[in-house]
Image (tube, rainbow, N blue to C red):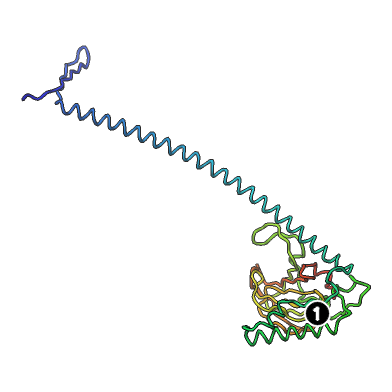
């Protein structure tokens, strides 16, 4: 059987030599098949590339919307933070005004229910039960001996007699105030926050004194404030001391005005050695400078 061929004649020009190319039948069919496959592959690649471009466009659009939402979220967070700071300031002011005019529980000594529950629970350790009992006893004794005292500082309630030893008017440490009470920029996030106390910068290890007589409510690490001491001075007034390196008192211990209760440190969330000092009236932070008179 004779093989079939395709003959191709090539004319290079009027003066050129004629070229004749003979290709087998199957070769031409293979070339045509490869050409069809190539065209189909190119079409598939073009379609895939077009779909990829569409997805990239959608992704860029979603990313732009995401960035816009993040910006709006940050704006809303800043607005909420400022609003919360204003509410905290108003709450502090309202508490002081209420106490000034004798409203609420200002004139009644505060007896924390937590201490009573700690003293009566059956599964507590011997040491914790002893401290809670000592704390309860000291509170009862303080309440029985100071029934005519007020919960506000000297000068705020001129119509009542206030014991000088129970008002936190003594500076716990003497140093530079690096952050005051009220609105400020957070040193870590750079956003506006409400600062509920005073930051007093002093050297590491400086002794911290109790600004008034009281009973220790807390002497343990606390989130953000590191080693923290909380002292109850009776009649709704408590003071807080944060970032301590050492604590020299225990829960339930009675302390006197000027007694050393701890040492300044850098525990907790802090950028340097300092004392975070707070005054709270009925669990509401107030400006400590109104009490620091000595």
Name above or below for residue 111 compared with residue 32: below
Left or right of 72? Residue 159 is right
Quadrant in the rendering for residue 248: bottom right
* Label 1 sits on residue: 212
Image coordinates for residue 185, horizontal then vertical, percent: 70, 59
Identify the residue at horizontal 27%, vertical 29% (top origin).
36
Identify the residue at horizontal 20%, vertical 16% (top origin).
11
Image coordinates for residue 34, horizontal then vertical, percent: 24, 31
Who is closer to the viewer here, 47 or 204? 47
Q: For the N terminus, give its image quadrant.
A: top left
Graded by Cα atoms within 10 Å as few (under 14), some (14 to 19) or many (20 or more), the crowding at tag 1 reads many
Image coordinates for residue 143, horizontal then vertical, percent: 82, 82
Quadrant in the rendering for residue 290: bottom right
Identify the residue at horizontal 69%, vertical 73% (top origin).
242
Name above or below for residue 49 compared with residue 252: above
Q: For the C terminus, give its image quadrant.
A: bottom right
Quadrant in the rendering for residue 179: bottom right
Image coordinates for residue 218, horizontal then vertical, percent: 70, 78
């Amino acid at each position: 059987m004779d093989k079939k061929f395709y003959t191709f004649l090539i004319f290079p020009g009027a003066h050129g030599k004629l070229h004749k190319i003979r290709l087998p039948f199957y070769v031409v069919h293979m070339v045509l098949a490869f050409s069809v496959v190539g065209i189909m592959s190119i079409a598939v690649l073009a379609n895939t590339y077009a779909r990829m471009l569409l997805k990239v466009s959608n992704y860029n659009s979603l990313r732009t919307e995401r960035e816009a939402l993040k910006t709006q979220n940050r704006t809303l967070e800043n607005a909420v933070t400022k609003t919360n700071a204003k509410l905290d300031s108003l709450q502090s002011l309202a508490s002081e005004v209420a106490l000034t005019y004798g409203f609420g529980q200002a004139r009644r000594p505060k007896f924390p229910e937590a201490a009573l529950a700690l003293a009566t629970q059956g599964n507590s350790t011997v040491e914790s039960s002893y401290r809670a009992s000592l704390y309860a006893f000291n509170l009862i004794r303080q309440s029985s001996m100071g029934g005519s005292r007020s919960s506000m500082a000297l000068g705020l309630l001129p119509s009542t007699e206030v014991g000088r030893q129970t008002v936190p008017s003594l500076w716990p440490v003497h140093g530079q105030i690096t952050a005051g009470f009220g609105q400020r920029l957070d040193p870590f996030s750079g956003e506006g926050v409400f600062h509920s106390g005073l930051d007093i910068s002093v050297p590491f290890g400086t002794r911290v004194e109790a600004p008034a007589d009281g009973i220790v409510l807390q002497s343990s690490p606390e989130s953000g404030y590191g080693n923290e001491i909380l002292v109850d001075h009776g009649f709704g007034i408590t003071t807080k001391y944060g970032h301590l390196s050492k604590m020299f008192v225990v829960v339930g211990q009675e302390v006197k005005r000027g007694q050393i209760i701890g040492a300044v440190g850098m525990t907790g969330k802090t950028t340097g050695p300092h004392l975070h000092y707070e005054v709270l009236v009925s669990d509401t932070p107030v400006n400590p400078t109104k009490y620091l008179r000595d």
